[in-house]
Image (cartoon, rainbow, N blue to C red):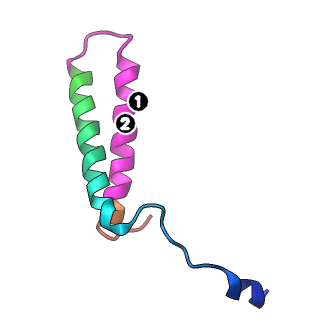
């Protein structure tokens, strides 16, 4: 078991720490923009097409923002 432990590679995140703040900003801005368009939209058929990407952008943006400031989830 110890030999297997020694051969494992260190964890490397899929997104570099240098880009996490930028990605968080882009996702949060996209989510807030889509939320604004959603609130002005009167069509019931367009509501899910705007709400789903807005909520996903805000959710992933929040996770990237938390990771960018050093709180790892």
Dot 2 crowding, Cα within 10 Å, few <14, some 14–19, many 20+: some
Residue 50, percent from left and from top = 34, 24
The answer to whether 42 appears left or right of 11 in the picture is left
Q: Is residue 21 above or below residue 17?
A: above
Please check the rendered image and state whether residue 61 is part of the magenta-colored stretch, yes or no. Answer: yes
Q: Which residue is mark 2?
A: 55
Snapshot quadrant of residue 11: bottom right
Q: CA distance from mark 1 to mark 2?
A: 5 Å
Question: Can you tell which quarter of the image residue 36 is in?
Answer: top left
Most prominent secondary structure in the magenta stretch? helix
Tell me the magenta residue range. 40-65
Expressed as whole percent of the image width and height from the top left, the position of residue 59 reads: 38, 45
When the figure is inspected, residue 53 is found, relative to residue 46, above or below; the finding is below
Please identify the quarter of the rendering in which residue 43 is found: top left
Residue reaching furthest to the right:
1
Where's the N terminus, which quadrant?
Answer: bottom right
Near mark 1 (Cα within 10 A), the count class, few <14, some 14-19 or many ≥20, is few
Residue ID at (48%, 66%): 13
Check if mark 1's residue and mark 2's residue have beta carbons within 8 Å. Answer: yes
Picture residue at 24% right of the left edge, 15% below the top: 41
Task: From the viewer's side, name the closer residue of 51 and 25.
Answer: 25
Residue 16 within the segment the image draws in magenta:
no
Indicate the quadrant containing the C terminus: top left, top right, bottom left or bottom right.
bottom left
Q: Secondary structure at mark 1?
A: helix
x 39%, y 21%: residue: 49
Where residue 16 appears, as percent x and y from the top left, is 39, 66
From what the image shows, is residue 57 above or below residue 6?
above
- Label 1: which residue? 52
On residue 6, the disc is none
Residue 9: percent from the left, percent from the top? 61, 78
**Relative side of 10 to 67, left or right:** right
Residue at image location 33% in from the left, 43% down from the top = 58
């Amino acid at each position: 078991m110890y030999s297997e432990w020694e051969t494992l590679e260190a964890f490397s995140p899929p997104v570099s720490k240098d880009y996490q703040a930028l990605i968080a900003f882009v996702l949060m801005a996209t989510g807030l923009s889509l939320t604004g368009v959603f609130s002005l939209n009167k069509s019931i058929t367009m509501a899910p097409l705007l709400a789903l990407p807005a909520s996903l952008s805000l959710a992933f943006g929040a996770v990237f923002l938390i990771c960018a400031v050093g709180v790892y989830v």
